[in-house]
Amino acid sequence: MQEKIIIFDTTLRDGEQSPGISLDAAEKLEIAEQLARLNVDYIEAGFPVASQGDFEAVAAIARSVQGPTIAALSRTHLSDVDRCWEALRDADKARIHVFISTSPSHMEHMLKMSPSQVLAETKAGVSRAREHTADVEFSPQDATRTPYDFMLEVLQCAVDAGATTLNIPDTVGYGIPWEFGDLIANISKEIHGEYIISTHCHNDLGLATANSLAGVQNGARQVEVCINGLGERAGNAALEEVVMALTIRSDIFANATTQIKTEELARTSRLVSRLTGYPVQYNKSVVGRNAFAHESGIHQHGVLSNRSTYEIIAAESVGQTASQIVLGKHSGRHAFSDTVAKMGLTIQGDALNAAFQRFKDLADRKVEITEADIEAIVTEEVGVHEDSFFQLDNLAVSGSSTDLATATVTVTSQHQSVTTTATGNGMLDAAAQALSEATKLEARLTSLSITALTGGVDAVGTAVVQLESSTGLKVSGRAISTDVVEAAAKAYLDGLNRLVRMRTRLEQRDVSITP
């Protein structure tokens, strides 16, 4: 008989902890709704005690998202557990996820606690969580560097206090698959009670997916994962990798199945990439741009004869496709909106009108408009029309890309246009200086990456920037264009808009902005 593997998605909690990612409540809700369409079992929506913004996001998801159980993270402190439940209480199904560090390094340098104190905290935190809900998860942080006997003692304490899921976190990516698999198997033998074993593996050694699968093979029935492998440092086990490994290698994992709607994987990946500002590497398994691309002549010959010669996954099964729609400058609004709808994208009103106009403008510059072009236009336009304070009306740059250059920008804010000119060390720097003057916002550009979304010399590219304000707020911005400088300038402005939104939210809560 097949046993269900529970998919516990922590993109909105551990994934958002990636440097430079700062999602607001609306963005978290949008991702959560897509995760529900993907049909994950659990959505870990955040860490409510971390900030008011995180609390509000968890509460909004708990109220609105149907289907998955909504989980939130809590330390063992009783006030933390209560705050966690406050955010979750409106969910149809809720889980409190309690954790405490158990490794000698963490206990000595972070907690300043003895093993007996950690045991007492575990019992108290889990017991309080169980007062709120029957669905309680417990994690001994840094489990793979915790002495085995002590870890067993803590885990048994958690089960006795009411934990129904025991999560074994490889917090620093220290585990090796066969070693981690043995650990899971031994825990299931030694810990008495009714519970499910879970894995939470980090990718510091590139083994997160392998360790997760080793856990499943040895009795784990929940896997904690992130879309695109996001997360602290090198990230977490990627949801799409774990799910497709279980699906494709059912000969090995004969007793394991998931309820994931795999055809939603690519769409979910693109949404998370757009909202977080983290691009998906070209050769990323399952959802990467090159996952179903073939350059070698031998490979091409084989695939043309039969796709199974070099593809073990059907592209359509994960929401990828080799076929491309072809639209051009003579295509009308109806054809455009019909194509957008068939792609599973939702856009209407002013955003639809603006997206159609951008499509027509792009068609004048690009011979063939692909599905990827349209998705890039639509997803960006939706973001522009949500709550952008500044909009870029015009950009003109002159000079060298490396020497002194000049940029003139026109920015509209609250129906008022401001035009400024600035110089900089190269066109990108000049454009950033001009935008800062036009918006009266200063921010330090900490990183910039520009990549092609589509092929050809007239490819649509995406620019991703990371900015840091003088107050210490960190955001990412993203934009698309066929022009490199324009893409970078628009991404910079997108980042400035995010800074305004974050500052406004903090001021509304009467919270001081500190680094």
Image (cartoon, rainbow, N blue to C red):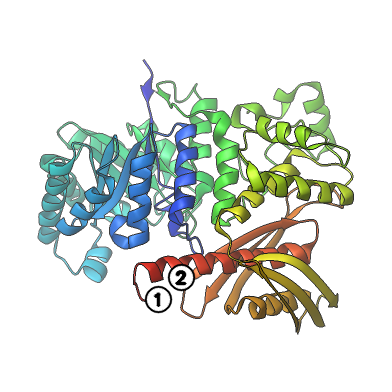
Q: Residues within 10 Å of mark 1 (few under 14, many from 20)?
A: few
Quarter of the image with the N terminus in it? top left
**Residue furthest toward the front?**
415
Residue 259 lies, in percent from the top left, at 44, 26
Q: Residue at x 19, y 70 (%)?
A: 112
**Quarter assignment of residue 356:** top right
Q: Residue at x 71, y 56 (%)?
A: 480
The reply to whether callout 1 and callout 2 are in contact (CB within 8 Å) is: yes
Viewed as shown, does residue 220 lie left or right of 131?
right
**Quarter assignment of residue 5:** top left
Residue 99 visible within the image: no
**Residue furthest toward the top?**
1
Residue 430 lies, in percent from the top left, at 74, 79
What is the secondary structure assignment of the residue under circle 2? Answer: helix
Q: Amino acid at mark 2?
A: Arg
Residue under numbered circle 1: 513
Q: Residue at x 51, y 28 (%)?
A: 261
Q: Nearer the viewer, residue 132 or 360?
A: 360
Is 320 placed above or below 273 here?
Answer: above
Q: Nearer the viewer, residue 72 or 107?
A: 72
Is 286 placed above or below 422 here?
Answer: above
Disc ID at residue 503: 2
* Inter-mark Cα distance, 1 to 2: 8 Å
Residue 377 lies, in percent from the top left, at 71, 48
Residue 189 lies, in percent from the top left, at 21, 33
Viewed as shown, does residue 333 lie left or right of 490?
right
